[in-house]
Image (spheres, rainbow, N blue to C red):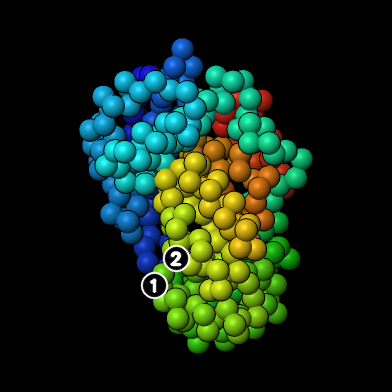
Amino acid sequence: MQLQLKKYRLQLKHTFTISRESHDFQDSIVVGLSEDSVTGYGESTSNPYYNITQGSLENEINTVRNEIEKHEFTNPDNFYELLNSLELTNFAKCALDLAANDLYGKLLGKPLYKIWGTSSYKYPITNFTIGIADVDTMVAKMKEQPWPIYKIKLGTADDVALVTELRKHTDAIFRVDANCAWSAEETIQNSSALKDLGVEFIEQPLKASNWEGMRSVINASQLPIIADESCILPEDVSKCHGHFTGINIKLTKCGGLTPARKMITEARSLDLKVMVGCMTESSVGISAIAQLTPQLDYVDMDGALLLKEDIASGIQINADGSLIFPKTGGSGIHLL
């Protein structure tokens, strides 16, 4: 197996702001794994919240290059056993695991969703994310990108007033994401007003460690509550039961498609709703997420739509949110 690494700085169309940070670009690492002249691709992005940089990803993957290139590749599960034996962050595992899954499907000539026994006939529509800004800017972004579902990033001085103003300009479904910025009391109070404003659910309102607060919220909220920062690893899924309505899985944070599929299975067993989200990846990462959509209740895979210029082809997202799945195997990724 041959390993290739490519570094990219992905320029965003607009400054993207959440409750704790703003950025105009996203650093990304794309991994290529090749076997028999076939290459699978995977991606992971930098993330200051988790102390992940492009340089740290490059260094740790290069550190285990020999072990990876000596590996006798048979399937992604076998390859993930190797990854678990190495000292890698989940972000690095994600890029390698996505590449291994894409490679496996390409070698078999089948898309991953078919290999997993699912169908592309039914899938949730992705939301389009509107980052925090002044009201006029947020409205302008919605008008620039008409969409059936918007995720509104919150954490301002008056979030309900902000959503009230945005609602005047669209009939689209709203989802809101406070990125840990609220208290339990705020969440309970906001949930009633936001429900009246056509909000579908609230994502991660409290700090990730505030399980006691989440218990009080889930018992009193007028809206479903989806875990994000509180649900990173497979072992976190069971903790979310009784504290959240559902979970938002991020491939970069959990370590790729392989652990994500286990998280989906466990969440279903606990009657939790399942969402998969993105971290402003290019179509390399987004195309991998798309293969999971038949198994999901909600999806946030708008990362490539937020970029000025994409670096790959794969899944196509139409203006109405519908998908055109690649005909090639794996995740169907090709670098441009």
Query: In screen coordinates, is 24 left or right of 200?
Result: left
Quarter-of-image position of residue 64: top left
Q: Amino acid at mark 2?
A: Ser
Q: Amino acid at mark 1?
A: Ser
Q: Which residue is mark 2?
A: 230
Viewer-closest of 214 and 151: 214
Viewer-closest of 140 and 124: 124
Q: Is residue 259 above or below residue 82?
A: below
Give the position of the N terminus as an image quadrant: top left
Tell me where residue 15 appears, x and y as whole percent: 43, 56
Residue 6 visible in this rendered orientation of the protein = yes
Query: What secondary structure is found at the residue carrying circle 1?
Result: loop
Quarter-of-image position of residue 162: bottom right
Query: In screen coordinates, is 14 left or right of 141?
Result: left
| Residue 209, numbered circle | 1
The tag earlier along the polypeptide, 2 or 1, is 1
Residue found 29% across the figure and 38% down from its top: 86
Viewer-closest of 169 and 281: 281
Quarter-of-image position of residue 22: bottom left
| Residue lying furthest top | 36
Separation of marks 2 and 1 at Cα, in angstroms: 7 Å
Label 1 neighbour load within 10 Å: few <14, some 14-19, many 20+: few
Tell me where residue 211 appears, x and y as whole percent: 44, 76
Is disc 2 in contact with disc 1, using a CB cutoff of under 8 Å? yes
Query: What secondary structure is found at the residue carrying circle 2?
Result: loop
Residue found 58% across the figure and 52% down from its top: 264
Residue found 53% across the figure and 74% down from its top: 243
Residue 29 visible in this rendered orientation of the protein = no
Query: In screen coordinates, is 324 left or right of 334?
Result: right
Label 2 neighbour load within 10 Å: few <14, some 14-19, many 20+: many
